[in-house]
Amino acid sequence: MTIRRFFKYVNIVIAVFSLAALALGYWFVFRVLPRTAGTLRAPVSSRAQVVRDERGVPHIRAGSIEDAVFLQGFVTAQDRLFQMEFLRRQAAGELAEIFGPAALTSDLESRRLRMARIAEAHALRLPPGDRAVMAAYARGVNYFLESNRGRLPVEFTLLRFDPRPWRVADSILAGLSMFRSLTTTWPNEVLKQRLLAAGNRTMVDFLFPVRSGGEAAPGSNAWVLSGAHTASGKPILANDPHLEFSLPGVWYQTHLKAPGLNVAGVSLPGLPGVIVGHNERIAWGVTNLHYDVQDLYVEQLDLPSGRYRIGGEMLQAAREPEPVRVRSARSIEVIVLVTRHGPIVLSDSQRHMALRWSGAEPGFEFPFLQLNRAGNWGEFLAALERFPGPAQNFVYADVDGNIGYQAAGRLPIRKSHDGDLPVDGASGEFEWQGTIPFAELPRAFNPPSGVIVTANQNPFPPDGPHRIHGNFAPHYRSRQIRMRLASRKTWRAADMPAIQTDVYSAFSHWLARQAVAAVDSQKGAQPAVVEAARLLRNWNGQMAAGQAAPLVTALFYQHLRKAVAERAAPGHGSQYDLQMAPAVLERLLTERPGTWFPDYEIMLRAAFTDAVEEGMRIQGRNPANWSYGRQNELLLKHPVVGELPLVGKYFRLGPVPMSGSPTTVNQVTRRLGPSMRFVADVADWDRSLMNLTAGQSGQVLSTHHKDQWEAYRAGRGIRMPFGRVEAKATLEIEPESAAR
């Protein structure tokens, strides 16, 4: 065979493989991209339209609210079906059925929490209006499934399964998934008990402030300015919820328009309506309230019989079998024991702990379509009064110039709550005494300052009528937002992203000065320690990715936190990592009680030296060459396609160095950060801004899968069209009956 002929054959083989790859790519990926133009017949009552703008956001125009919600379910399934399937399976404890044994831990936790049973119970008792909304949404999802069998997103092909029809209970599961992520505090109670058992009660109590404790948890920022502070004379509202990063992101943008409804913003895939956004008259945003809505009870339980004691009475715990299917392995069955407080979620050294959680309490409602139609403060409050949780701070602005704030959710009233685990609840001391009446929750309307800021800080007055316990955030973010807003007389909507992306940390700046003072008081420090202190001496407190000083302070904080907790509970210092820990340390180092450390400077120098030595291990011996961003990298990858060998790297974002920290307005860690940024301009809704982390579509080869990523990284707001929508694709919806 001649060389010429050999290369001819090689080229033919390459061509064949290339064509085969293109054919496979088309069949499995491009062919399943959503249909966004043309005409579609669907079970709607009258003609409708789905107009997609330049970011792929659907603007739904329908003849009735029911049709609009039906189409919302349809278009969300077009773009996010696998994410919806993942959410409901994660909440129900059914991931192992498709992912195998690796998902068992997640499944067992969800089964112990009885998430699927709770969702089914809530679905049975939904108010008729809420049920109708969720049913219309489910019909839209299922219409997409029925009309696209064999053309579902690539994840279903790769994992070799078809989703079952969507149900009302599945929408509730999607909501409970968020509810759980925003309210899970019971591990902190267990942690405190562990530290109490090993340490000094007074010191451990100091580490867990009763009114403001809590784990490092998702946080958010929201604020609203009255017209007195804006160039337009109308309010501006800003919101950036901080949640765990994912690809696709948490939120799905949508615009619903029908008689009596015209609302735009973000929804949660799997749930109808708009969660954060605006209509023609009002705008609203949310942050997590972080009120504690979970309690553990130590039950006097005889495990073999399932009987437990309340006072002098013996009761029988319910036994609920939970069969868990596992792909490529044998199914397993767990038995969940349920007492009057809730399921046994933890057994530790013969102690059996039951969890009571507000998410499992009867009376679930879904008032968001009512909220979406509200036109004034009174109607807004009427919708929030029905909101069950997760407990949230809502900020408000309207076209009449009013601004407001309302805490919402069902918050348990406790006679006692000091962080101890109650044993035998028969006395009633630790039992819930109902929930705080809506009228008694924190509220503000048109405050004289014309400014409202919520950044997960404690909004309850110290002299209020109820015992308050929550994992509220320290004051650093809320104080910085207020300082930024006070720095100018007037603001425009376009100015807000600069505040949302602020990376100044007052805590880290203060901590740097503590380190410098401690090192300066010592002679003969290691050269690297001296150099690290020099970097901090004139540092401006900006937690910027490319600088060394932020890494020095971050490492110093970690070692200082461990040293303090170790003093309170020897052997357990590394376990202490709470959201309020920075404020706890600041108070300790400001007051410096002699009962903690005989010489604080020695303790600080030791912690700082340990921090510098760790920095040298991970980034080299010269602190001047360190980079904070290398330790604060963000990697977003698709949970299925992003894990594929060879090609998976093409379906990831990052790793990229990120600026920000848990105590900056731009609250960023490797795990969580701003899940979207929203700015509502009440003077002109079309000047409003919204930016998702990556993009609108969950389809990996869609042009809208990650087309918002660069703007997100740069902190650049993207126009949010409302009245002036430029159509890039239009899908006309015809009633099925019109074909007959």
Image (tube, rainbow, N blue to C red):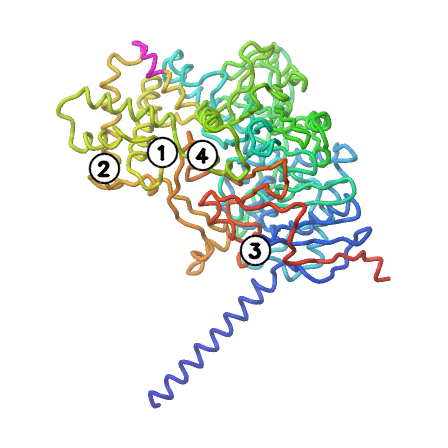
Disc number at residue 542? 1
Query: Is label 3 in contact with label 1 (beta carbons under 8 Å)?
Result: no
- Which of these two is toward me, 220 or 740? 220
> What kind of residue is marked 2?
Pro
Q: Nearer the viewer, mark 4 or mark 1?
A: 1
CA–CA distance between discs 4 and 3?
28 Å
- Asked whether the beta carbons under mark 4 and mark 3 sit within 8 Å of each other, the answer is no
Q: Is residue 730 above or below residue 359?
A: below
Q: Is residue 700 above or below residue 234?
A: below
Q: Residue at x 52, y 26 (%)?
A: 456
Q: Earlier in the sequence, mark 3 or mark 1?
A: 1
Location of residue 479 in the rendering, given as x and y in whole percent from the top left corner: 46, 24
Q: Where in the figure is residue 272, as x and y percent of width and height?
A: 68, 41
User: Residue 667: which numbered mark, if any?
Assistant: 4
Q: Counting residues from the N terminus, which is met first, the one under dot 4 or under dot 1?
A: 1
Q: Residue 589 lies in magenta, yes or no?
A: yes
Q: In the rendered image, which quarter contains the N terminus?
A: bottom left
Question: Is residue 457 rendered magenta in the image?
Answer: no
Amino acid, disc 3 = Gln
Spatial CA span between label 4 and label 1: 12 Å
Q: Which residue is mark 2?
A: 623
Q: CA distance from mark 2 to mark 4?
A: 25 Å
Query: What is the x, y in percent for residue 151?
Result: 64, 61
SS category of the residue bearing label 4: loop
User: Which of the two marks, 3 or 1, is nearer to us in this view?
Assistant: 1
Q: Of tags 4 and 3, which is closer to the observer?
A: 4
Q: Residue at x 50, y 21 (%)?
A: 351
